[in-house]
Image: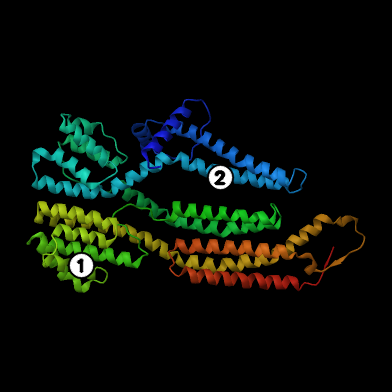
């Protein structure tokens, strides 16, 4: 919900429902006080009002998803059917799941919006402070407030439009300081930074090496990663086992078990997104499992380091060319890109500005575009000053890179466990699946026979007990479970050749299933 009109309707609905004395529904049970404060300051609503509106949405979705399905089931099957109440329970469960998912996304709209903007701002706050510190060294000290405002607008942050409004009001006589005092942004780090600037009249010493909130959050993610991996493996392994129990005791009709597969996929996907996926917005964090991107970023850092050394002595154009020539032989990914752009610059086909614009396009990543923009703007002001600031940027980027490497190492250390589970899982599930048709048939015989009233035993072949439809349906459901679980296990540890692994797990499952099934077919008889 990024559109302003949609957001306004959402806020209006919350305020309208929030007036009534009704139950509330919360999903963010440990929501920090800072975010509650931002709810009120940015959107003029409280967490309690959001909870009340969420409860209404939950009830609405539950009723309007359950009632149509109930009527259709009633018309097609009728209440006299023995499976009616089982299907009714399944419909209740599905409606509950659907309404809970919709209510969750409704309840967290503001939080996710605030968190997204906060991450975007915090990701660039280091670069903003480094850039502004250079302006303070070489710019007019009396216009620092105006320079800072223009800098925020140029950075194209989620709050840049608000600084445009502040700048426009300042041109017609409003005080810049008074407007900044009233400014509240989604980033607490940025809010504190604004306060420090106002208290020091924009002359504060820039402490851009201090650890940010995003770095602290990423460190917390790293500390808890092993536990989260364990949870993911446990759930992925035992969900299909629980499904086998459901099939065995026929808690729901076998054909309806297929509808539980999307539920398993959604659960594993949701857990992966929340627990395992690297969602860090730190500008120095790249996907450590993409070797191409990792190498490109390492080479880019080396290029910046060399550029900083040449900027101490030469102009930006010459420094750029000399840096490219100095490190080009050692590069693999950036060699061709830098060679072509440097040749254009030296032959006067393009200016430094246009060359950097082309370079940003070829690098194909927003992080490079942001860094090159900032470095170019600093080079215009002072080559020597830019050299010092690039070194400061490199310190921060390498700090981020170290965090990313710690994250990757933990993931890689669990690769053997994931592979072991992936190959063990189809053996276990295939064996259970091979026995399931037999157990289902035996349970059915026990249910229908009055064993105590029998004075003699009847011989029944095991082959006669097993229904071929149950065998096929069980095979398809458990094979799908094997594929789903194996895929997510490989996704967790970023295993590249997952197609081969999926093929092998399918083959192992099929062999295990058929061997056990063949064994049950060869059991001659049972007495009942």
On the picture, is 302 further left or further right than 244?
A: left
Q: Relative to 269, is 192 above or below?
A: above
Mark 1 highlights which residue?
338
> Residue 208: percent from the left, percent from the top?
21, 48
Residue 423 appears in the picture as rendered: yes
**Camera-side residue of 291 and 499:** 499
Q: Residue furthest front?
A: 349
For the C terminus, the quadrant is bottom right
Q: Residues within 10 Å of mark 1 (few under 14, many from 20)?
A: many
- Indicate the secondary structure of the residue bearing disc 1: helix
Q: Which residue sits at x=52%, y=64%?
A: 486
Q: Which mark is residue 65?
A: none
* 220 left or right of 261 in image: left
Residue 203 shows up from this direction:
no
Q: Which element is circle 2 on?
A: helix
Rendering coords of residue 80 (x, y %): 78, 44
Q: Position of residue 419 (x, y in %)?
A: 50, 68
- Numbered-mark total: 2
Indicate which disc, 2 or 1, sits on the residue closer to the N terminus: 2
Between 515 and 266, the residue placed more toward the observer is 266
Q: Quick one: quadrant of the N terminus?
A: top left
Q: Residue at x 35, y 63 (%)?
A: 288
Where residue 327 appears, x then y in whole percent?
18, 70
Identify the residue under disc 2: 98
């Amino acid at each position: 919900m990024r559109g302003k009109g949609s957001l306004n309707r959402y806020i209006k609905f919350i305020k309208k429902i929030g007036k009534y004395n009704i139950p509330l529904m919360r999903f963010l049970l440990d929501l920090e006080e800072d975010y509650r404060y931002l709810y009120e300051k940015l959107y003029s609503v409280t967490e309690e009002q959001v909870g009340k509106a969420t409860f209404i949405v939950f009830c609405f979705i539950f009723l309007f998803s359950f009632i149509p399905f109930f009527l259709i089931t009633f018309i097609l099957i009728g209440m006299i059917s023995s499976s009616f109440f089982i299907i009714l329970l399944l419909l209740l469960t599905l409606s509950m799941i659907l309404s809970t998912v919709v209510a969750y996304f409704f309840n967290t709209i503001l939080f996710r919006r605030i968190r997204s903007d906060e991450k975007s701002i915090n990701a660039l706050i280091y670069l903003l402070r480094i850039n502004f510190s250079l302006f303070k060294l070489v710019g007019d000290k009396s216009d620092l407030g105006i320079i800072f405002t223009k800098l925020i607008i140029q950075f194209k942050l989620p709050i840049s439009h608000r600084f445009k409004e502040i700048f426009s009001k300042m041109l017609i006589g409003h005080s810049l300081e008074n407007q900044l005092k009233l400014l509240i942004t989604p980033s607490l780090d940025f809010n504190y930074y604004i306060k420090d600037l106002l208290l020091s009249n924009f002359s504060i010493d820039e402490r851009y090496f201090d650890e940010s909130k995003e770095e602290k959050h990423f460190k917390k993610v790293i500390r808890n990663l092993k536990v989260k991996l364990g949870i993911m493996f446990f759930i992925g392994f035992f969900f299909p086992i629980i499904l086998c129990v459901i099939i065995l005791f026929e808690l729901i009709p076998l054909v309806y078990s297929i509808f539980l597969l999307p539920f398993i996929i959604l659960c594993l996907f949701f857990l992966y997104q929340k627990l395992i996926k690297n969602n860090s917005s730190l500008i120095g964090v790249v996907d450590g499992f993409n070797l191409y991107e990792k190498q490109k970023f390492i080479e880019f850092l080396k290029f910046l380091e060399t550029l900083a050394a040449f900027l101490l002595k030469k102009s930006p154009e010459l420094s750029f060319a000399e840096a490219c020539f100095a490190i080009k032989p050692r590069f693999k990914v950036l060699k061709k890109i830098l060679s072509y752009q440097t040749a254009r610059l030296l032959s006067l086909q393009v200016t430094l500005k246009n060359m950097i614009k082309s370079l940003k396009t070829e690098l194909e990543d927003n992080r490079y575009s942001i860094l090159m923009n900032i470095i170019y703007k600093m080079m215009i002001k002072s080559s020597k000053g830019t050299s010092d600031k690039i070194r400061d940027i490199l310190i921060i980027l390498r700090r981020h890179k170290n965090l990313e490497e710690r994250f990757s190492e933990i993931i890689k250390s669990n690769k053997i466990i994931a592979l072991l589970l992936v190959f063990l899982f189809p053996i276990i599930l295939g064996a259970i699946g091979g026995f399931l048709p037999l157990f289902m048939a035996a349970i059915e015989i026990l249910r229908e026979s009055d064993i105590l009233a029998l004075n003699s035993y009847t011989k029944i072949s095991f082959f006669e007990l097993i229904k071929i439809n149950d065998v096929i349906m069980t095979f398809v459901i458990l094979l799908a479970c094997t594929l789903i679980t194996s895929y997510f296990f490989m996704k967790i540890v970023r295993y590249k050749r997952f197609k081969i692994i999926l093929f092998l797990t399918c083959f192992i499952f099929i062999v295990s299933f058929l061997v056990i099934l063949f064994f049950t077919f060869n059991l001659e008889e049972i007495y009942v």
